[in-house]
Image: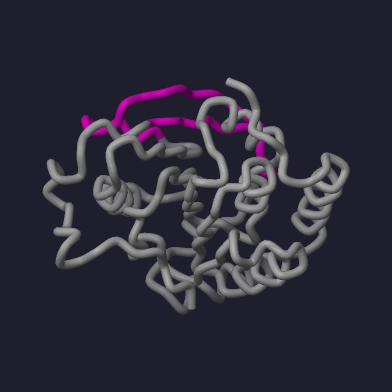
Amino acid sequence: MEEPELQIPWGRLALWNTLFGALYFFRSVSLDIWLASKKTDVEFGELKFGETNLKAVREILKRVPMNSNTTVFELGCGRGRAAFLFHFLTGAKIVAVDLVGPFIVTGRRLARWMGCQGQVLFCYENFLQTDLREADVIYACALCLGEQTRESLAQRISQCAEGTHLITVGWNPQRDWLEPVDQLRCGFSWGTAGIYINRLKRTPQSDPHYRDEESDPPRLPSCP
């Protein structure tokens, strides 16, 4: 599959990727995560922070088609490194969701700085409460998620439309309503992990968790 048309010059993209790498290594985020865990019912371990780099994003894009008409939901987005890379490489609209407030604040500031705040949206929200039915692609780093959280997330994803791509890191969902597309291993900020790419193969109407669209229409998050 050919790579999508780049939305910004390669030099600027490389600089952006290097900036995120520097932010990752030179600013401690443990306190932000600990404070967020105290404000919610989410365990500290499930909020652990890591980042998806440019190489991993490019490998994903070789397997999952995205363009300016694609809506991508990134669940557990951190400061948005992957969200920005997906947008810069494809022009896709990104909805980036996280429960750590300072990450969302930083992501929004960076989006304003880059002039893409209308296309890369940062939402302070528990992604288990996010309406995902507008998603064409869902990206979730699930390496640190517990079994109960993974199961709840799978039920949420099962409401999406047939053909929606699900990309997970560190977790292969293996549901009967998912069609395996590919899997690979890539390096991340914390080390190497598996990436599992699946596609929903049954219609949402066949799923017991699906809600009637006429009475409860799909919507993009308000992103408070």
Find residue 47 and report its horizontal and vertical position in percent: 51, 60
Q: Is residue 174 magenta?
A: yes
Quarter of the view holding residue 200? top left
Q: Is residue 212 magenta?
A: no
In the rendered structure, the answer to whether residue 103 lies left or right of residue 200 reads right
Q: Which residues are magenta?
A: 172-198
Find residue 18 and report its horizontal and vertical position in percent: 83, 48
In the rendered structure, the answer to whether residue 98 lies left or right of residue 155 reads right
Q: Nearer the viewer, residue 48 or 60?
A: 60
Q: Is residue 105 above or below residue 172?
A: below
Quarter of the view holding residue 149? bottom left
Q: Is residue 61 above or below residue 109?
A: above
Examine the residues drawn in magenta and state their main secondary structure. Answer: strand
Residue at position x 26%, y 45% in the image: 158
Q: Is residue 191 above or below residue 37?
A: above
Residue at position x 50%, y 38% in the image: 169
Find residue 62 and report its horizontal and vertical position in percent: 59, 26
Name the quadrant of the N terminus.
top right
In the rendered structure, the answer to whether residue 17 lies left or right of residue 185 reads right
Residue at position x 67%, y 46% in the image: 85
Q: Nearer the viewer, residue 48 or 200?
A: 200
Q: Nearer the viewer, residue 174 or 34?
A: 174
